[in-house]
Amino acid sequence: MMNKWTSETYKRNSGCGTIYITVDVDENNRPIHIFVDNSHGCNATIKTLSDYVSHDLETNKSDLKEIVQILKKNQCDVSIKNENSEGNSCCHIIAKILEEYLPKNTPKSKRVLNSPF
């Protein structure tokens, strides 16, 4: 049986300009991969971060709620000062999008994520 993935691309304003986030989901609407294009800012860092998050999603190394919590903590002075930014950082914007895929009313995870972030 072949797995069917669907994708949705989001366009958001960050502190440095426009950021595009594509989320691939499986047949259960579970995110399994993300692609991020942020050509106006820290593109290399954001691409590395998206690869890291995608690896965790693909291997079920971390649950989505943990990933969202970690990404939401990140703050960027440029984003905070820019009134058009849709988050406190690009990571925060990514987290807000991924948060939409969380099941409603899920209990908090008790597992500690070993992450350099």
Image (spheres, rainbow, N blue to C red):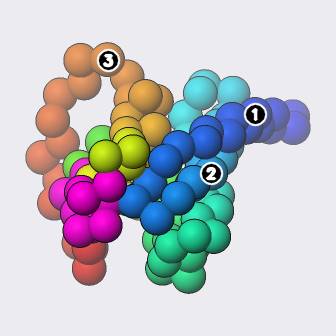
Write down the region rendered in magenta. 70-82
Neighbour tally class for label 2: few under 14, some 14-19, many 20 plus, Cα within 10 Å:
some
Residue neighbourhood size for the residue with mark 1, other residues' Cα within 10 Å, grouped as few (<14), some (14–19), many (≥20)? few
Give me the C-alpha separation between circle 2 and circle 3: 25 Å
In the displayed structure, would residue 6 be above or below residue 59?
above
Cα distance in 3D space between marks 3 and 1: 21 Å
Residue 110 position within the rendered picture, expressed as x and y whole percent measured from the top left: 12, 46
Question: Considering the image in quadrants, where does the C terminus appear?
Answer: bottom left
In magenta stretch: residue 77: yes
From this view, report whether residue 27 is shown above or below residue 83.
above
Expressed as whole percent of the image width and height from the top left, the position of residue 41 reads 51, 73
- SS type, badge 1: strand
Q: How many angstroms separate mark 1 from mark 2 (CA)?
A: 16 Å
Horizontal arrangement in the rendering, residue 43 relative to residue 85 (left or right): right
In this rendering, is residue 54 above or below 3? below
Residue located beneath label 2 in the image = 20
Camera-side residue: 86 or 112? 86
Q: Which residue is mark 3?
A: 104
The picture quadrant where one finds residue 43 is: bottom right
Select label 1 or label 2 by which is in front: 2
Q: Earlier in the sequence, mark 2 or mark 3?
A: 2
State the quadrant of the N terminus: top right
Kind of residue at badge 1: Thr
Please give the label number shown on residue 6. Answer: 1
Residue 38 within the segment the image draws in magenta: no
- Three-letter residue code for mark 2: Tyr
- Dot 3: element: loop
Name the N-terminal-most of marks 1 and 2.
1
Is any part of residue 24 visible from this angle?
Answer: yes
Q: Secondary structure at mark 2?
A: strand
Image depth: mark 2 or mark 3 in front: 2
Q: State the residue in front, 31 or 97.
A: 97
